Amino acid sequence: MAINRKYSSGADGVLLNDRDLDEIRKYGQAWNEASQRGDKAGMQAAHDAAEAIRGKYNYSGGAAGNEYIGLGKKNQSNIAGRPTKVDTEKFTYESAPSYTSKYQGEIDELLGSILNREDFSYDPDTDPLYASYQKQYTREGQRANADAMGQAAAMTGGMPSTAAVAAGQQAGNYYAAKMADKIPELQQLAYSMYRDEGDNMRLNMEMLTALEQGDYNKYLNALNQYNTDRNFAYGTFQDQRNYEYQLDRDYANDLRYDQEWNYGVGRDQVNDSRYDREWQHQLDREAIEDQRYQQEWDYQVQQDALARAAREVRSRRSGGEDYEEEDRDKEASGEETDVPVDRNSVIQLGYGPVSDEYLLQLEAEGAIESYVEDGKRKFRKKEGGRSGGFVIPGLDSMLGVR
């Protein structure tokens, strides 16, 4: 349940921010101007506008705008208009660049060829160049054999002889020997070709590897730049989230401060009200005690006056020592003790035709005083004395006056 609490003026300057405080002052000026014009609608509009601002701070200024009346609302902040933000966002960023090699297939294939390449071996029967040389030397051997046999036969009249056959064979063997001598040369040539092929494969491997390394270096540069940009973006995200978190914490602290402030104001008002009640109760008790004391004092004075009056009357009637002693005091002071009473002075007192006993009572109270003039005892109101006496019921009967 909301509890309305009043507080002294000055809450606007304590609770409002500068902008709202300026607005309140403008509305106050507008209210004064409307009041001078007698514009009640304008006065009410200015008051309502000012109250709307105070409402954001959980209090009212009252009818005159100079009070603090807590509205008892919860979750109000003295930083009006500050939004709360629950940060549920997570950091997101574009995917990192990936690397796909354009040369890895060729590199793997070429590397396999290099690593799995057969060792060098030479077989003349499988060498096309050897076969070409073989045809050439065989043909030349056959031609030399035929020429030798023909020459030898011509020497013998055209008839082949053993010498002719031997010469032919010798010419054929010459070319066969030359063919055999060609095999090492062809083997060396084949090895050179084998070696050059291996060198070319390695050169191709180096070229592909260089191309691969160049592309990979470009990827690493792109990845490093990505990480730099991502770290910067994450740092910015963290800074913003920390800032918003701090705003939320400040807002929560402001709410807690407002609640504690309003509670403290309420407690102060309760204590002030209790103190006022206790103070008023004390004043009332003191007033009652003062009244009781005055009543007791008046009663005591009355009793003293009554006793004195009774004593004087008895002394006068009985001629007692008290009255004689008083007369002796008066004679010593030059006053006359047995003089008639001037009734006109009694009437002028304003009490009417009262008895001598009542005059004695008034004189005992200090309301009047007696004096002797022209051979008569006269009475007059005493300056500074009590204004008027009071009638003591039953005094005559108590004194035995008839």
Image: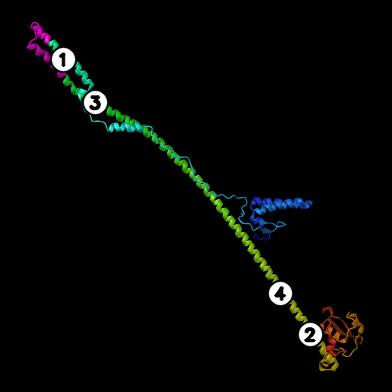
x, y (%) of residue 234? 48, 44
* Residue matched to label 3: 192
* Residue 202 relative to residue 257: left or right: left
Which mark is in front, 1 or 4?
Answer: 1
x, y (%) of residue 189? 22, 24
Whether label 3 touches label 4, CB < 8 Å: no
Q: Amino acid at mark 2?
A: Gln
Looking at this view, is 31 or 101 the one in front?
101
**In this picture, which residue range is highlighted in magenta?**
149-178
Report the residue at 54% width, 51% height from top.
246
Sequence-wise, the earlier of marks 4 and 2 is 4
Between the residue at mark 4 and the residue at mark 2, the CA separation in whole angstroms equals 26 Å
Report the residue at 82% width, 94% height from top.
321
Is 256 placed above or below 184 here?
below
Where residue 164 sits, quadrant-wise, is top left
Is 294 placed above or below 202 here?
below
* Residue matched to label 1: 141
Q: Amino acid at mark 4?
A: Arg
Between the residue at mark 3 and the residue at mark 4, the CA separation in whole angstroms equals 134 Å
* Residue matched to label 4: 285
Furthest residue to the front? Answer: 159
Q: Secondary structure at mark 1?
A: helix
Between the residue at mark 2 and the residue at mark 1, the CA separation in whole angstroms equals 188 Å
Q: Secondary structure at mark 4?
A: helix
Between the residue at mark 1 and the residue at mark 4, the CA separation in whole angstroms equals 162 Å
* Residue matched to label 2: 303
x, y (%) of residue 129? 23, 20
Q: Amino acid at mark 3?
A: Ser
